[in-house]
Image: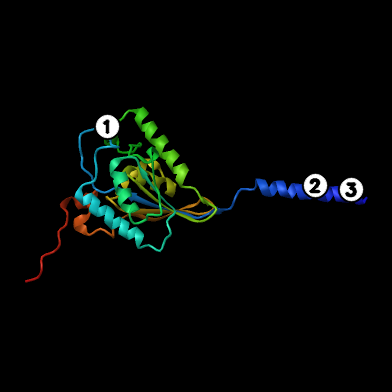
């Protein structure tokens, strides 16, 4: 009888150990800070990993978003950018404020054109190109917009307007083809939080509070570049 009880206890402990070893590690909150690149120099088509760099205004915008991030009571976990020049340069400026973060780059965050309800916006794009854009962005979303493992994380991602708007639509659980209804300016800040359960909360979209009006660009209303008001007589 005692032998049978001992065998049972051993098997029970083994079973518990197997379950513990195979259990998923606990999930934690992840907060993603999406930054659109600064204003850049438009040039003829070419390899955008080596052309279309930031303008002087773009570098100024990058320094201001870096200061905004540096002033936040947040311990950032990572810094990632698109491989395109304008995003890499913006991320490099931000990285100067966070020397402990090693800049990572990935083509998953490159600018692309996913489908939209505005047919005129897709003029010239082939179905294969639209399919590839959506596949790229869906893969990127599945890569970063997941709960953190081991501890809470706060990640800085520097990418592009279309990419950020598509991510916001996905996080809200609405039709991704509605992304063109949003506007995010150069070096704006969009913040999306992923709970341990995988639920999303959009905390900010296209925030440019760190940029004076005359340093804003990439927004419809910014075309006039508002100047400082004249002093009263």
**Labels 3 and 1: the sequence-earlier one:** 3
- Whole-angstrom CA distance, mark 1 to mark 2, is 66 Å
Crowd class of label 2 (few under 14; some 14 to 19; many from 20; radius 10 Å) = few
- The quarter of the picture where residue 45 lies is top left
Residues tagged 1 and 2 counted as in contact (Cβ below 8 A) = no
x and y percentages locating residue 214 in the rendered image: 18, 57
**How is the structure coloured here?**
rainbow
Residues tagged 3 and 2 counted as in contact (Cβ below 8 A) = no
Q: Nearer the viewer, residue 27 or 119?
A: 27
The residue most toward the front is 99
**Labels 3 and 2: the sequence-earlier one:** 3
**Labels 1 and 2: the sequence-earlier one:** 2
In the image, which is nearer the foreground, mark 1 or mark 2? 2
| Mark 3 residue element | helix
Q: Nearer the viewer, residue 27 or 96?
A: 96
Residue holding disc 1? 123
Question: Residue drawn at (34%, 52%), measured in percent from left and top?
Answer: 95
The residue most toward the left is 233
Crowd class of label 1 (few under 14; some 14 to 19; many from 20; radius 10 Å) = few
x and y percentages locating residue 139 in the rendered image: 44, 38
Question: Residue drawn at (35%, 60%), measured in percent from left and top?
Answer: 70
Residue holding disc 3? 4
| Mark 2 residue element | helix
| Mark 1 residue element | loop
Residue holding disc 2? 11
């Amino acid at each position: 009888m005692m032998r049978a009880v001992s065998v049972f206890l051993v098997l029970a402990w083994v079973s518990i150990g197997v379950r513990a070893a195979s259990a998923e590690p606990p999930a934690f909150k992840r907060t993603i800070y999406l930054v659109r690149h600064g204003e850049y120099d438009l040039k003829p088509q070419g390899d955008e990993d080596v052309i279309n760099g930031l303008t002087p205004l773009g570098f100024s915008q990058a320094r201001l978003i870096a200061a905004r991030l540096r002033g936040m009571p947040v311990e950032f976990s990572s810094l990632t950018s698109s491989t395109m020049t304008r995003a890499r340069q913006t991320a490099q400026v931000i990285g100067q404020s966070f020397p402990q973060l090693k800049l990572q780059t990935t083509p998953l965050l490159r600018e692309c054109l996913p489908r939209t309800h505005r047919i005129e916006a897709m003029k010239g794009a082939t179905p294969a190109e639209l399919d590839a854009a959506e596949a790229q962005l869906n893969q990127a979303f599945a890569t970063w917009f997941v709960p953190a493992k081991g501890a809470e994380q706060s990640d800085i991602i520097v990418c592009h307007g279309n990419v950020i708007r598509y991510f916001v639509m996905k996080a809200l659980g609405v039709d991704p083809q509605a992304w063109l209804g949003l506007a995010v300016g150069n070096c704006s800040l969009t913040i999306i939080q992923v709970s341990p359960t995988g639920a999303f909360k959009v905390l900010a979209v296209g925030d440019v509070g760190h940029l004076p009006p005359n340093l804003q660009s990439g927004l419809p209303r910014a075309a006039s570049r508002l100047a400082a008001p004249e002093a009263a007589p």
